[in-house]
Image (spheres, rainbow, N blue to C red):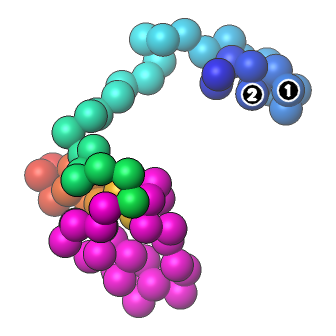
Amino acid sequence: MAAQTARLLGFPHNFQERDFIVHDAYLGGGYGVLGDAEREAIRLLAASEGLLADPVYTSRALAGLLDMIRQG
């Protein structure tokens, strides 16, 4: 999908599977189920940047990113 998107945008790169690392430890409680981590991510992004994250995908991804940053 990344390679197809790059071609569509005229970006001359052919992504390979090895170019990506998938972390599935941040799947949460299920589709649309907000947990504490997602709530914290939504609040932090809103307070620090004035942006509202959606509660399904973006907040979960941000919660995972925050956790990885905190772990170093």
- Does the stretch in magenta take in 48? yes
In the rendered image of this protein, does residue 48 appear above or below residue 25? Answer: below
Q: Residues within 10 Å of mark 2 (few under 14, many from 20)?
A: few
- Does the stretch in magenta take in 2? no
In the rendered image of this protein, does residue 64 appear above or below residue 25? Answer: below
- Magenta part of the chain: 33-58
Secondary-structure class at tag 2: helix
Residue linked to disc 2: 5
Secondary-structure class at tag 1: helix
**Dots 2, 1 in contact, CB < 8 A:** yes
Q: Residue at x 27, y 34 (%)?
A: 24
In the rendered image of this protein, does residue 8 appear above or below residue 68? Answer: above
Residue linked to disc 1: 8
| Picture quadrant where residue 32 is located | bottom left
In the rendered image of this protein, does residue 22 appear above or below residue 63? Answer: above
The residue nearer to you, when weighing 46 against 69, is 46
The residue nearer to you, when weighing 61 against 18, is 61
Q: Is residue 71 left or right of residue 60?
A: left
* Callout 1 amino acid: Leu
Image x and y of residue 3, in percent? 69, 18
Label number found at residue 37: none
Q: Residue at x 54, y 80 (%)?
A: 51
